[in-house]
């Protein structure tokens, strides 16, 4: 990887800054962060020259280990196939993973994220114990493996340890297949302390908390969890219609309605999916300042439904995108499917961009950039003080030839099948060159060994 000493300088012919596109931009970098930004300057002898540069995007929701089972759940069972039948296969796959396997799969997922333009990941991490549900000697062993995978690949990490205690609303007893996930509050507090130590060597990692879902925690546990830290708070919510119906039967209220009426939800929160919401709930989310975490590829793969993004964005809602089950890791595909889903519902084009001042691609990218950064607890974009995370587009790619300005983003997101990313820099270090991660072969080798053991 390229060195990142005090005084490293990157110079971009074109860069997407907070105020829009700028020419001839120099980024001075120290300790992985942008220390100064200059516009309209000639390239200096010490500058590393780049072409068209955009900020790296945050992937606000990932279950890294599920990358290893991608494509293995595409055969229908005897009854109607759904998220719930997919989950049974996922539990069987999870049961076979040891720490080495888990780390190897996470490295593969994080490598692919970087190659796709994600430079930070929110790891919604719920695999904590051994296959029998016993804590490892190091309580945070699996959190440490997440951190090791981030270190090996170079991706930024916002670690979100998951609290999971029940199988259904009202404190229903957990199922045997959930043994590796379970905690009580004291054990989880100890896990958080150990996880904080595990991520400290990464330098700019963020620690949050993730109550898994309203069905997996009791109200009392949820209140206690919210008091355990001051970092991001993420929760799965209203992903499935069956979840909404179960919540209504338990409480008389819908999941998002219950959460916003019972807790002081604010900008620390990320409501993951929130697929099945009504207009009043949308308005309440907007008023809270929380981010909605949308995972269009996974939501389509699982048959979850389509979030009413058009109404939410028109009302000023904040969103980001995540790769969730990692069935496909692709920034452009997530944003494209988000827009296309709304086009299919509305039966018109260019639905989500609120006005002609920005193209659809630029609006989607910038909105996901801001929402993702908020949800992951970091500063957004190319600005002094922020991490030096950036993506260089390949303007020689057939889909980007002859483009300028917003058309670079539109053509990447909507027209480039692959290969539109030339290089990626994370915390001022180059991690991707010519579209390939610098450690790709070693990471692929470890992944192949792990999958051979787990699947065979």
Image (tube, grey):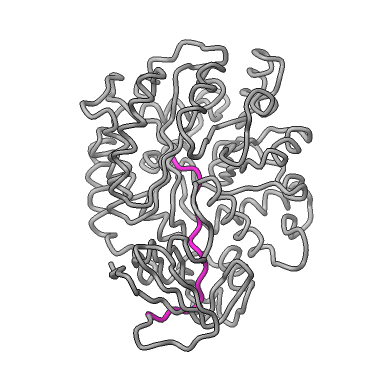
Q: Which residue occupies 41% across, 66% down?
A: 424
- From what the image shows, is residue 400 above or below residue 134? below
Q: Position of residue 198 (x, y in %)?
A: 29, 40
Please state the extent of the stretch shown in magenta in the rendering. Answer: 48-63
- From what the image shows, is residue 212 above or below residue 20? above
Q: Which residue occupies 48% across, 69% down?
A: 420
On the picture, is 72 further left or further right than 6? right
Q: Which residue occupies 34% across, 84% down?
A: 46
- From what the image shows, is residue 112 above or below residue 77? below
Identify the image quadrant of the C terminus: top left
Is 394 in front, or is 200?
200
Is 306 in front, or is 192?
192
- From what the image shows, is residue 257 above or below residue 350? above
Numbered circles on residues, count: 0
Identify the image quadrant of the N terminus: bottom left
In which image quadrant can residue 22 be found? bottom right
User: Is 56 one of the magenta-colored residues?
Assistant: yes
Q: Position of residue 296 (x, y in %)?
A: 58, 46
User: Is 433 one of the magenta-colored residues?
Assistant: no
Q: Position of residue 242 (x, y in %)?
A: 63, 23
Dominant secondary structure (helix, strand or loop) of the stretch shown in magenta: strand
Q: Position of residue 273 (x, y in %)?
A: 60, 38
């Amino acid at each position: 990887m390229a060195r990142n000493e005090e005084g490293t300088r990157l110079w971009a012919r074109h860069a997407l800054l907070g105020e829009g596109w700028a020419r001839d931009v120099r980024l001075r970098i120290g300790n992985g962060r942008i220390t100064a930004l200059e516009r309209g300057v000639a390239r200096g002898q010490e500058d590393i020259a780049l072409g068209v540069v955009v900020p790296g995007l945050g992937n606000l929701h990932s279950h890294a280990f599920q990358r290893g089972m991608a494509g293995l759940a595409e055969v229908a069972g005897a009854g109607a196939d759904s998220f719930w039948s997919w989950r049974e296969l996922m539990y069987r796959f999870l049961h076979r993973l040891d720490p080495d396997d888990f780390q190897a799969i996470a490295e593969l997922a994080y490598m692919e994220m970087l190659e796709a333009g994600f430079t930070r990941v929110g790891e919604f991490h719920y695999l904590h114990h051994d296959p029998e549900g016993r804590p490892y000697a190091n309580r945070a062993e699996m959190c440490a493996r997440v951190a090791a995978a981030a270190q090996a690949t170079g991706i930024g990490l916002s670690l979100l340890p998951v609290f999971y205690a029940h199988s259904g609303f009202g404190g229903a007893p957990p199922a045997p297949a959930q043994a590796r996930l379970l905690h009580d509050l004291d054990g989880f507090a100890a896990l958080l302390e150990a996880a904080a130590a595990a991520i400290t060597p990464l330098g700019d990692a963020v620690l949050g908390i993730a109550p898994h879902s309203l069905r997996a925690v009791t109200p009392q546990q949820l209140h206690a969890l919210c008091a355990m830290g001051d970092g991001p708070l993420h929760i799965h919510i209203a992903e499935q219609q069956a979840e909404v119906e179960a919540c209504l039967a338990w409480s008389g209220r819908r999941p998002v309605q219950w959460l916003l009426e019972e807790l002081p939800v604010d900008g620390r929160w990320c409501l993951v999916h929130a697929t099945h919401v009504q207009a009043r709930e949308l308005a309440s989310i907007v008023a809270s300042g929380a981010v909605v975490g949308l995972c269009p590829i996974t939501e389509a793969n699982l048959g979850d439904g389509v979030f009413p993004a058009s109404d939410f964005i028109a009302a000023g809602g904040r969103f980001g995108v995540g790769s969730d089950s990692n069935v496909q890791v692709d920034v452009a595909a997530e944003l494209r499917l988000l827009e296309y889903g709304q086009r299919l519902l509305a039966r018109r084009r260019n639905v989500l961009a609120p006005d002609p001042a920005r193209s659809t691609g630029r609006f989607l990218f910038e909105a996901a950039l801001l929402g993702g950064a908020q949800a992951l607890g970091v500063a957004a974009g190319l600005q002094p003080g922020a991490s030096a995370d950036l993506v260089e587009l390949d303007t020689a790619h057939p889909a980007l030839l002859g483009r300028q300005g917003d058309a670079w983003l539109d053509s990447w997101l909507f027209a480039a099948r692959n290969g539109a990313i030339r290089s990626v820099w994370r915390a001022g270090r180059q991690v991707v060159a010519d579209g390939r991660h610098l450690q790709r072969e070693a990471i692929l080798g470890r992944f192949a060994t792990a999958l051979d053991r787990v699947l065979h």
